[in-house]
Structure formats: structure tokens, C-alpha cells
Amino acid sequence: MKKVITGNQAVAYGVILSRVDVISAYPITPQTTIVEELSELTASGRLKTVFLKVESEHSAMAALIGASTGGVRCFTATSSQGLAYMHEMLHWASGARLPIVLVNVNRAIAPPWNIWSDQSDSLSQRDTGWVQLYCEHNQEVLDTVLQAYRIAESVKLPVMVVLDAYVLSHTSEAVEIPTMEEVDAFLPAYCPEYPIDTQEPMAFSTIATPDHFLEFRYKIQKAMEQVPEIAKKVDGEFRSRFGRGYGAIERYGKEEAEILLITSGTVTGTSRIVIEKLIGKGNSVAGLKIKRFRPFPTEEIYKEIKGAKKVAVIDRNLSAGVGGIFAQELRASLYSREERPQIFGFISGLGGRDITPELIEEAIQYTTEHPRPEEEILWLGLKK
Amino acid sequence: MPMISISLGHMDWNKTGAWRAQRPFYEDKTPPCSAACPAGNDIVAFIQKTTQGDFEGAWNLIKEENPFPGICGRVCFHPCESKCNRASYDEPIAIHALERFVSDFASNLNKKIEKVKGVRKEKVAIIGSGPAGMSCAYHLAKLDYDVTVFESSSLAGGMLRRGIPSYRLPKDVLDREISNIVALGVEIRTEMPFGEKLELDDLKDYQAIFIATGAHQSRDLHIPGGGGKSVFSGLGLLKKINLSKKVKLGDKVAIIGGGNTAIDVARSVIRLGKKATILYRRSKEEMPAFEDEIADAIEEEVKIRYLVNPIRIQQKDGMKRLECLRMELGEKDESGRRRPVPIPNSNFFFEAESVIIAAGEEIEVSFLPKGLEKKEGIVLTQRDGSTGIKGIFAGGDLTSNQRTVAHAIGSGKKAALAMDCYLKGKDSEEALRQILIGDGPSISIFRYLHPQERLMNPHVVTFDELNTDYFEPSRRQREFKGPVKKRTKGFGEVTSGFTEGVALEEAERCFSCGTCVECENCYVFCPDASIVKTGEILSHQVDYDFCKGCGICFSECPRGAISLKEEAR
């Protein structure tokens, strides 16, 4: 069944269809309508879950850590300051190997106060041991929530599903909503690795001395390394059941191109139109959407990148002192490779400013005209 | 190696209790209501029984300390409610109304009361069958003594019968609570006025005597015309009305005084179809009558004129002319109230057909045994009621200026304890100290009889010591009062008691200060699972092998029933 729904409603449908047992969340703009929808559904009895009201995002995640340890499927959603407030507990969730799914609606971090789209909140959490998946449209949002539980529960790592504030969260699109039976067939019930038995008490996340700590971290890295293969399998199965799939990355435009434009989130939608237009004008360009940021799809990207002479990356985020985070990760991933095209790191659209087709075209034009970037950080649309 | 750090066995070997710097422990503390109750009622205990719907159990708990719940529930000035911690939150618990409900409920059960008399050989005589004498008789009977009460008039009850109008205390309630005491085996011999038909020498067979003859003499104003015809004493008038005698009064009645007797008289006068005006020499703030009573009187159209002092009563054409002075308030006097000072040349006249003087009561001393020490209008005793004469004890209005029913009940109970100690050769002062409620002066005779049960730290729980996060604001339930026009037509009871539903609702409001009600907050919040349950029931024990002493149980206890002390180093 197709419905015209917002990105936040798509999240709610994803949660309902995933048969989540425990939801705990604290409202924050622009995530609020997700929580409203789910709490109302729970209160009315139509959604059979436990909805825990909490006083903060830190507690929301702490509550889910308890619930997930108890062996049930858990969900939360947040944005910006809320995600930052959860930071300590994000580490705990991954360290305790709990397959919690969190939806983060990308929003800038204050000050100055700003409630609009910006990836700095989720990218600030890149080292917390969470899988991160970025979405381009509302259909992808719903589908990614469903896939997230499969991935999380396979590798025992938490997954963060990310969507842009307003452009997706509050904008309606037609979305195909699978039936409960279809999803049940795709997503089996969650089986915890260490079920709790009150008759045989155990202590969880006890102290690990220097003798063992390194090994626990090694296991998390190994689990991360399994994600590409498992995610590919899950995506493949999803495609065969629902006719839609996303991959870790997606290439569009020319199959062989001199210039490759790399984006994530909703900027990709705009870029598709720009790339099509430029190809029509005879340019040798292609686009690459990065969906999975963690674990970083190094191999997948390298396959697409090696034929290109130059790569333009548009980052809607800023790691002050370095530049765009996607560009930075890309540079690092290419260092040991034979073919290392020039990376042009553009920063644009911070705090929700529109990244227009004109700005994207300007980025590609700059990349075309320059053999190498004149500066480490190239600012698009910066007001003088 | 597992995926996460996890103990594959239990962690009981890790005795985290060794980290503890402070130790929580269960310890009931004294609620402010009980500490304020002159009769020593275990208020929290009876209210908690009420919340369980066990009204008879609640009644039994009150009767451990006080044989008169039906009377106190109606006429007590309830200092318990003034001290109720809930008053700092929204409104105090209607303790008096719950006490009345429980008593009225239990009386409808018509339980047979077993006789307890005859186990001990000692005989005890009690002179006066008011609340002090009967309370003493009750507790002595329960201590297995052979008790005889001597009463001067034809019916027992003393001031309860003679002084309190029946619209506040119906006679059947009084009769029922006195008969409950008689049923224990207490003998009441009426029409035995002390000093007339009964002399001290007649009581030689009795090993101990309790004198509680009360304060029945109306204080004279000592003003010209104050002793004239159709000038009555307040107490005399109430006695006549209570004994159903005809009273002749004019239509316009002046009542001089500001105490409870003045109010009782004025409201009785209204019920006789007359107009009542109270003349009081101080202002409303200084009035010794209870606030509720004053409010009821005003509602019933009793007029009160403050800062007015009659100095002469004259007769003129069948009317009384009261020459009065207007007063103003000066410095504080020895009672702590501002002294009324006459305003010079402010004389005016107030006319009335009848004048009633209700300016306080005094004790009768003529018949008292020689050797009793007296000072400032009362007989002096030790705090246990013992007098200078061996074997003679005294209490009630005779020995105190706090002339309330509850104080009288308390003093009778204290004397019973002291007489028991005297007759058994025990140190009564030491016994008294052991059973004080809070810092006293009230005592718990339950603790005297059961020293190891319901232990309680004397510390009185303050509002600040409660965790009110766990309480919801709620309105105090009110007793229904009949419409003024209807209730002033006769001497029927003005207020009607709580229904069962209302009583349960009101009892639920009780914070239960200092007493555990098994809410299980401690059990739920303990991060170390160190609060122990036996089956489904809280054991009130802490597992000190694992308790880290974080104090969460202490701070999350809504009612201060858990204490925390530093561990010895």
C-alpha cells in the first residue's frame, strides 16, 4: 500500500513493522513527531510496546540498554543536542554489543541555536562503535529501519539510521508500506546472545582488566568488518522481497567519468538532477551516494573512484580544524591505494541552508577547472 | 572468550558491602500527630488499619491508649491536625473525623466486651467519673485491678455529661463508651459526693486512690450586681440543659467570657430560641475557645462583641443593664496574650434580659484531703500524677490548666501507669521515661505492656524529612454539617460522620510519617538488590554483604522510615 507520509512517519511505520518491544525517547525538534506518533499509538493500544517516558536522552538510551540486555527489541530517536547528551550511553550500547536501533534526524548543534539540517550531530558520534546509515528519501527511511534491525541483530552492534531535518522529516512523499506479514518474513524475532535468567544471575559488562580489554575492542572491530557482507546480503534479500535495495553506496551518471561527485543524504537527490543536466551538456561526470558511513565502505568506494581523475565531495558538516568529515574519511581510505585522484573538499549547507543545483554545479565547475584544490577546504555559498 | 565482559557464574563472591561508608536501616519514627496527642493515640497505626478497610482493627488500636474514640472524634480540639505534616503540603488529615468514623463503625458491630476483673488482689478507688477518672479506671481494669469509681451525681461522665452540649456530643455516644468500660468489670457508684457521702476514711480498703474531681466552680467576676437573680453561671446553665431541666431565660441573652464554655452556652441559648451575644474583653486572636467552635457559633448567628468588659450589672424594668468599658490591647501578660486595658471614659450600656457568666472554672478544694499541695488554682502532682500523700494520685482538670478532654484522658492513663508501678513497687518515673511519645509529655501504655513491639525512634518526623515526590495533592474531606436553620432548632448532633468511602479516601491521604507502609520504593530503587523480601513481603532487612551504602533507599523513602548512619571506622 502506498501512502503519502513524512520522513518521521516513515520512521514510525518502520518501528511498528519491526515489532519493537520497548521504546524510550525524549522529544526534541525535529525528531518530535516520531515520538508523538509512537507514544500515541502505544497509548491507544494499537501498538503493543512498552513506551518509557524519561527525563533525558541519556536516560532514554540507558533504559534501552537495560531492556536490550533483557533480550527485547528496542528503539529510540533523537536529534542534535539530544544525541550529544546520549554520547556516553552510545559507547555503552556498542561496548555491550546491544542491537539497538536509533533514528537520528540530522540537526545542527548549538550555539547558535539552529534546528535545521546539518550532519555534525551524527558525525560527532562516529567513534562510538555504531553502524551509521544515511537516507536520501522517505521510502529509504522506512526500508532502512527494517534493514537496520537485521544488521544490528546479526552482528550485535547498534545501528543509527540518519535522515535530514525537514527536507525528509517534515516533507511528505509517496511511500510504499509493506504489510506486517511481509516484514515478519524478512525480520525474524530477536534472539539475545546472553538471555537473562533470574535463577542463574550473571553480571554484565563487568570490569575487564588490561589483560582482556584490547580483545573486546578487537571483537567490535571484527564485527564491524562483517557488516559490509551482512548488509549486502540483507539488502539483497530485501530487494528480492520488496523490489527495492540501496547498497552501501550508489553510483549514478556516466559509467566512466573524469569527475566523480560524492554526497550523502538528501543532497544526493539534488545532485542527480545536476549530474543528468551536465551529462546532457557533454560533461564527463558521475555521482556517488554514500549511504553507509560506518563501517566506512572503503572497498566499495575505491572500485568506483579509481577510474576518476578528480573527486568532489560535498560535506554538510564541519570538523573544525580539518574540514568536511566525508572528505577526510575518503582521503584517509585512499592513502595506501595506488590510484589517488585529487579530492576537492567542499563545505556547504551548514545549519540547513539549501544546497541548490547552482551550488552543486559551481562545485563541479571548480573541480573541472582546477588541477588540484587551491585550499584544503572549499566553501560553497559562503557570504563574504 | 565471550563477546562481552560477562560473569559466567554469579557474583556473590564480590561482597560489595565492604565499600560501604554509611549504613541504611529500617527504623520507624514518631509521627508529629501522635506526639501532639495528649491522649497518646497511635494515630498513624489506626489510620493505616483504616486504609486496609479493617475498621475494627483501627478501633482496637485507638482503644489501646484511649477508651473514648467516639468522644474524642467529636469534641477533641485535635492538636494532632495542627501538627500534621500534610498541612505543609496541602491540608491536614481529618484525624478527628476518622477517629469518629472508626468508633461509630465499631459500635455498630455490637461486639461483646469480656470482663477482665479479678486477677489481682489490690483494690483501687477513683473519685470522679469524668474523662480522667474513667480513663484511669479503664487502664487499671486492663491491668487486672479491681476498680471502683465514685461519682457525685446520678450519672457517670463528669464534665462530658454536664458540660458538653449534646449537639456536640450525643448522650448515647457517651453512654456507649462508658458502658464499654463498665463491661470490663469497673464498678461505678453514683450519688457518692466526695466530702459528703464519701470520706477518705471510707476508702481504707483501697490500696490506691485517684482523685479526679474536675473544675466545676464557675469563676466569679466580682462585679457589682454579678450575683443577682437571673444572672447564671455558664456551667450551671449547661448542666441544667444537659440534665433536661427547664431553663428560664429572657429573649436577649448576654454571655460574658471567651472560652469554650461561653461558646457552648451561646450556641445552647440559640437552640432555646433566644438571641445570644458574647461579650469578651480581648480580641478574637486571644479567645481561648477553639476556632472551629467560634466559626460554628458565628454561623449560627451568635453575636460576639470583642474588647468589651462589663463592670456593673444593674436591674431596670425587668431588663439587665450591663455597664461596660471598651478595652484596647496593651503589653503581653503572663499567659502570653496581650492584656486588655480599659479606655478611660468609654463607658456604655448593654441591655439584656438574662446574663450568663462564663469566665472560667475553678476547682473545689473544700473536700480535698489535707496535705495536697495547691498552687495557682490547681493541685500539684508529679508528672505521673502522684501527690505528696502516699497512695493518692490526682489528675484531670483538678491538676492542670489545660482543661481539655484529651489532656484529662492522658492524665488518667499516666496515673494508671503510676499506680501500677506503685502497687508493684516499681520506679514509675523510669517507666514513664521509657514510654514517652517523642519527647512527651504523652505516653504510650501499649509500650509499657509490650516493650519489644512496634518500636519507634522518639525523633518526630518533620515535613522536610519526607519525600513528597511520591504524594499527589488532594483535598481534605469534610464532615457534613446540617443547615443552620435546621440544626439550631434542637440539640441534635450538628455534624454527621464520614461514610465508609469518604473515610477510606481520607485515610489514604495520610503520609504515614515515620512508619513503613511497604510501598517498596526501597526495594524498587536499590541498585544493588540489597533490600530483602521474604516471599512477597518486605523483610525490612538490608543485605549488608552487598549494600554499598549509596543511600538511595533512604532518600526515596517517602516517609522517613529508613535511617542512615555512618559506619564505624
Image (spheres, rainbow, N blue to C red):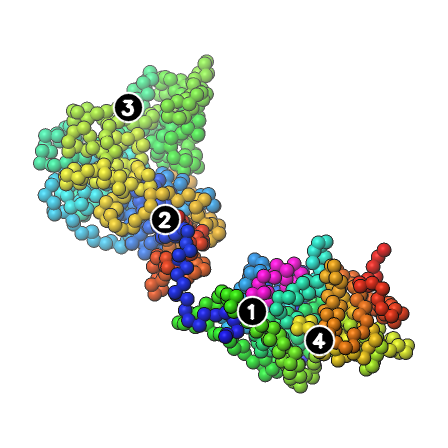
| Residue at figure coordinates x 68%, y 69% from the top left | A162
Q: Which residue is mark 1?
A: A214
- Separation (CA) of disc 3 from disc 2: 52 Å
> Quick one: A312 or B333, which is closer to the camera?
A312
Q: Which residue is mark 3?
A: B376
Q: Amino acid at mark 4?
A: Thr
Image position, residue A344 (x, y; %): 81, 68
**B285 in magenta:** no
| Residue at figure coordinates x 12%, y 47% from the top left | B119
Q: Does B502 sit above or below residue B388? A: below
Q: Which residue is mark 4?
A: A298
Q: Earlier in the sequence, mark 3 or mark 2?
A: 3
Q: Amino acid at mark 1?
A: Leu
Judge depth for marks 4 and 1 and give the one in front.
1
Dots 4 and 1 on the same chain: yes
Chain to which the residue tagged by mark 1 belongs: A
Chain to which the residue tagged by mark 3 belongs: B
Q: Which residue is mark 2?
A: B568
Dots 3 and 2 on the same chain: yes
> Quick one: B111 or B458, which is closer to the camera?
B458
Chain to which the residue tagged by mark 4 belongs: A
Q: Amino acid at mark 2?
A: Ala
Image position, residue B447 (x, y; %): 26, 46
| Residue at figure coordinates x 13%, y 43% from the top left | B146
Q: Earlier in the sequence, mark 4 or mark 1?
A: 1
Relative placement, left or right, of B345 versus B137 is: right
Judge depth for marks 3 and 1 and give the one in front.
1
Q: Does B419 sit above or below residue A289? A: above
Helix, strand or loop status at disc 3: loop
Judge depth for marks 3 and 4 and give the one in front.
4
Image position, residue B330 (x, y; %): 44, 20
